[in-house]
Amino acid sequence: MTEILIDYLDIYTKYPADNFLTKLDKKERHKRLTTWENQTYKTMPTFEEVVEFMSQNEILKFEKPFLMKILIPRVKEDVEQGNINALKYLFECDDKERWSYHNGLKRDYAQRKYYIQMFCDGTDWKYDQMELADLVLAHEADNEIVLNEKYKMSKYFLDFSIHEVPWGILADMKNVAGKKTMPHMFNNLQEFAQLSKKLNKDDDIFIDKCDTLYKAWEHYLNYINDYTGFKDYLTKHDIDYYCHS
């Protein structure tokens, strides 16, 4: 076992995460963890060694500093070499049921970490979550865990894009969709429809609603000066916008 893992194990052996700790003990553990996080180690464990360590010590608390210092860099290396095994592991960790019962041990879901999101953050968002899913699916088109994660991400985005209706359609967290954005929005919707069908989901009403509102918004943008707002457009064209989720 590499020194960095030995040191981490020693900290949580002396100050267990599940035990009652005095205020002084908590302060000491935090101090040691901060020192561990900032220390430079000559030898880093391989991805396989990290996974084995986490599997053998599941009662430990693997906080963000551990994941960002040890696990995420190993996954990044694997991805940059064109491999997907480490990336698949992150998706498996993000899968609620598999995560909660990994190796037959039920864990507290409240302590769950969002590994894929942390990977994006750890790479300064060189990749986004959807791109990472597609990296895996390019090699394993029927990977059930990744397909379901992509499905959840896609549906969340679509639902978010229409949640401000009747005021507008959103392209992202900050911007409304423009004329040049709409083809991409329709592509996302079509891809979601195909994914939904592949996973035997019942999303027909939701998909039709998104399609109706997207087409309405696209048309509205071409005649925006003829209306006092998108709500006015929807009302005058007798388009229902209340039950979109």
Image: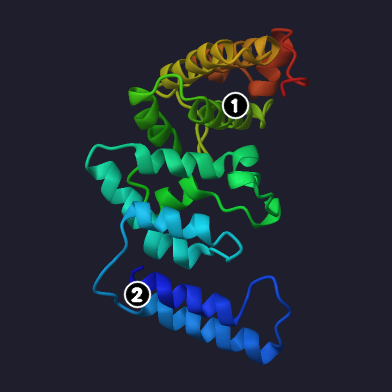
Q: Which mark is residue 30?
A: none
In the rendered view, tell whether residue 172 sits above or below residue 114. above
Quadrant containing the N terminus is: bottom left
Q: Which mark is residue 155?
A: 1
In the depicted view, which residue is nearer to us: 107 or 231?
A: 107
In the depicted view, which residue is nearer to us: 148 or 126?
A: 148
Q: Classify residue 210 as left or right of residue 74.
A: right
Q: Residue furthest right?
A: 242
Residue positioned 69% across, 7% down in the render? 237
Q: Quadrant of residue 234?
A: top right
> How busy is the neighbourhood of tag 2: few (under 14 within 10 Å), some, or many (20 plus)?
few
Of marks 1 and 2, the one in the foreground = 2
Residue positioned 41% across, 50% down in the render? 119
In the rendered view, tell whether residue 203 sits above or below residue 56. above
Could you say where residue 160 lies in the image, as x and y percent from the top left? 61, 32
Disc 1 is placed on an element classified as helix
Quadrant containing the C terminus is: top right
Could you say where residue 176 lies in the image, as x and y percent from the top left? 52, 32
Could you say where residue 91 lies in the image, as x and y percent from the top left? 49, 39
Q: Amino acid at mark 1?
A: Lys
Q: Pointer 2: what residue? A: 3
Q: Is residue 138 visible?
A: yes
Q: Classify residue 67 as left or right of residue 199.
A: left
Give the colouring mode of the picture.
Answer: rainbow
Q: Is residue 128 visible?
A: no
Disc 2 is placed on an element classified as helix
What is the total number of numbered labels drawn onto the structure image? 2
Could you say where residue 133 lies in the image, as x and y percent from the top left? 43, 32
In the rendered view, tell whether residue 131 sits above or below residue 45. above
